[in-house]
Amino acid sequence: MRGTDVATTKRAFATAHEIARRLQAQGARAVVLVGSYAHGRRHYASDIDLHVIGKRGDHILERYGGYLISISRGTADDARRGFRDPFAVGKDIPGWRHAVILVDPQRIARKLRAEARRWHWGLIKDKADREVAADITHVAENVQKLLGLLSVGQVMAAAVQRSVIAFRLPGILAVHHRILYESENNYVELVARRMGQPWTRYQRKALGIQAESLAATSEATLALYVLAIAEVRPLLDRRQRSVVGGACDLIRQRFGNLKSVQDEGHP
């Protein structure tokens, strides 16, 4: 690991510990670091993912020390329910297996991590199969909507349905093939690897990866985000503005000033 990477990682861990102490003072029974920093696979825009064991169940985002901080909170029973949810285990089990424990005076997090390491698909086999069947059946509604919208030329609504289908199918197949993934960022690739060809070829087309205009369509999508933020900005509180402002900063780092968007569209 390069020196700059080591320094960045140390700073991120120091930030995580600082926030964990704050959360403990607010009543957290345990705090663990999960996600890309725990797995050691961060990138320049990685957030710091913290899971808090406490009384309240919610998820918030905040910016602190230059990082986007993702804080998920719930009880130990909530975590165990995730171990029994076929569509949650793909991320939850690896997350807990590799969790870095920051606060755990009552050893609650250690017990959950141990349970995750003992977990196997056989524990939820029948439930997983039932939910795969149910979900793949529900996608049929999206398929019929897409076909109908294409037939009447409603291209934007059709594109939405296309995206919904492209998003849902890999998640269903991840459960069907019993795939665990360290991050939601890589399960699509893992499913494609398992499915092989022609799935991968069609998936790349569905997601626009093979199109020469991928950069242009990505920039257009991000421009829509900038415009949407400008539209709803009065509804955002200080914390929310900080979060979306950080995202827009990352957009500008990648695409500059997005010349296709008027300056007043920038938050």
Image (tube, rainbow, N blue to C red):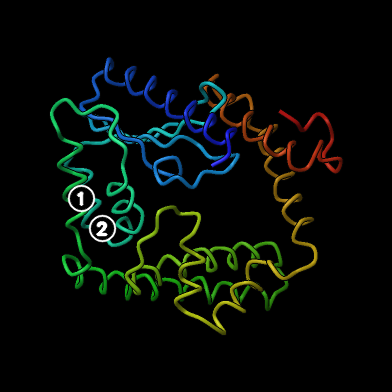
* Position in image of residue 8 (x %, y %): 54, 31
Note whether residue 20 is visible: yes
* Position in image of residue 132 (x %, y %): 33, 72
Label 2 sits on residue: 85
Q: Residues within 10 Å of mark 1 (few under 14, many from 20)?
A: few
Marks 1 and 2 in Cβ contact (< 8 Å): yes
Question: In the displayed image of the protein, which residue is found farthest to the top?
Answer: 25
Q: CA distance from mark 1 to mark 2?
A: 6 Å
Q: Amino acid at mark 2?
A: Asp
User: Residue at (60%, 39%) from the top-left corner?
Assistant: 44
| Dot 1: element | helix
User: Residue at (73%, 37%) from the top-left corner?
Assistant: 253
Note whether residue 227 is visible: no
Q: Is residue 202 left or right of residue 11?
A: right
Label 1 sits on residue: 81
Q: Quadrant of residue 30?
A: top left
Q: Residues within 10 Å of mark 2 (few under 14, many from 20)?
A: some
User: Residue at (75%, 49%) from the top-left corner?
Assistant: 219
Q: Is residue 208 left or right of residue 125?
A: right
Q: Quadrant of residue 74?
A: top left
Q: Amino acid at mark 1?
A: Arg
Looking at this view, is 58 or 151 the one in front?
58
Q: Is residue 133 left or right of residue 139?
A: left
User: Residue at (78%, 43%) from the top-left corner?
Assistant: 255
Looking at this view, is 132 or 142 the one in front?
132
* Position in image of residue 112 (x %, y %): 18, 44
> Residue 184, relative to residue 252: is it above or below?
below
Numbered label attached to residue 6: none
Q: Quadrant of the C terminus?
A: top right
